[in-house]
Image: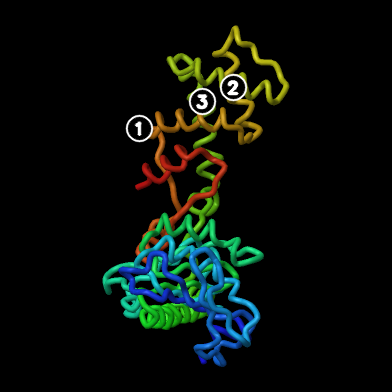
Amino acid sequence: QQGWCLGSSGAMACRVASATAAAGAPMLVTPSGVPKEQLESEDLFLVATTGELLKIPSRAAKVSDSASVFQAVFDRRSDVTAVCHIHSVASVLATENQEVLRVRGTEMIKGLGVPGDGVLVVPIIDNKATEPELVPELLRVLEKYPMAPAVLVRDHGAYIFGSSAEKAKIATECLGFILDLEMRRGRTEALEAPLKRRRCGPSVVLLDIEGTTTPISFVKDKLFPYAASAVASWVETAELAEVARDYEKQCKEDQVPFNAAAPKEEVLRLTKEWIAKDRKVPALKDLQGKLWKHGYERGELKGEMFEDTPQAMAQWVAAGKRLAIFSSGSREAQRLIFKYTH
């Protein structure tokens, strides 16, 4: 009726002993190849812990392929005496893009022994060609999650546990509800995501500096000339050695000479040459940032922005947008323009 055991799929097993005396007890297992809605009590196999068939039904040819999985669960979990194995669309979809299913805030998790304020944790294992091949990975996750009420098998289905046949039935129906709910939520979110994006608009506003937030003339007519003139006095500072190394490295990349014996003259010459050519090399950008910072701090430079830039930025921030800058200038240079604009 639920569509969990379509065709002849699915299986169930139950130990024929109480939970306190289950160790070593045989289990009743459903047959393979028989529609589950047609099953009667005489159709069940009785299987020993060794795998020996103690009772073979007259009309069933083969015990369920899941028998070895059932036995592994019973051997590992003394609190489990019944297991249901289902094949449902929701149980397959729930395994996509995750290793563990975690569900909280849903009332039906209580049916799997999880408190209402707790988290349902169901580990997921990869499918194999045959059920017996699932056992090693199943045991591994049961060791990692010793109280897991179920295990999902990717692109296959689920094994749900109970301390009795009735408890296993309840847990299976509750997990089925939860998986179906998660599937429907996923569909709803997938349908609503494009609408949310259209409704909310972009989450990030990406800006350039020149011609966007700040006049191009400020950069070309003020910042660049200032750096070209200020470098003459700056080359006398202690920071020259580091900048000279960066300039020499850039010259090697450009395959042009650099006179290391005269670092002042070389830095001065190359700075003016690169600024004139508007080169975007890191060595020049870093030095320009240092020169401009000195100019801003001494009051020789003041940042400039278009009149509507501050108001537009404030409105975007108030609307929860993130502002970002994409520019060939250094980060330091970008910060300085905004910091020293009044």
Report how far apart the C-alphas of labels 1 and 3 lie in the structure.
17 Å
What residue occupies the far front of the structure in this picture? 54
Instruction: Give residue 39's position: percent from left, percent from top.
Output: 54, 89
Q: Which kind of residue does numbered mark 3 sit on?
A: Ser
Percent coordinates x, y for residue 297 in the rendering: 35, 32
Tag 1 secondary structure: helix
Q: Pointer 1: what residue?
A: 297
- Of 185 and 191, nearer the camera is 185
Q: Is residue 270 above or below residue 66?
A: above
> Can you identify the residue that label 2 sits on?
247
> Mark 2 or mark 3, which has the lower sequence index?
3
Q: Residue at x 59, y 76 (%)?
A: 63
Q: Residue furthest top?
A: 261
- What secondary structure is found at the residue carrying circle 2? helix
Check disc 3 and report the residue beneath it.
229
Q: Residues within 10 Å of mark 1 (few under 14, many from 20)?
A: few
The answer to whether residue 199 is seen in the rendering is no
Please state which amino acid type lies under the numbered disc 2.
Tyr
- What is the three-letter code of the residue carrying label 1? Glu
Q: Measure how far apart labels 1 and 2 are at the Cα level.
A: 25 Å
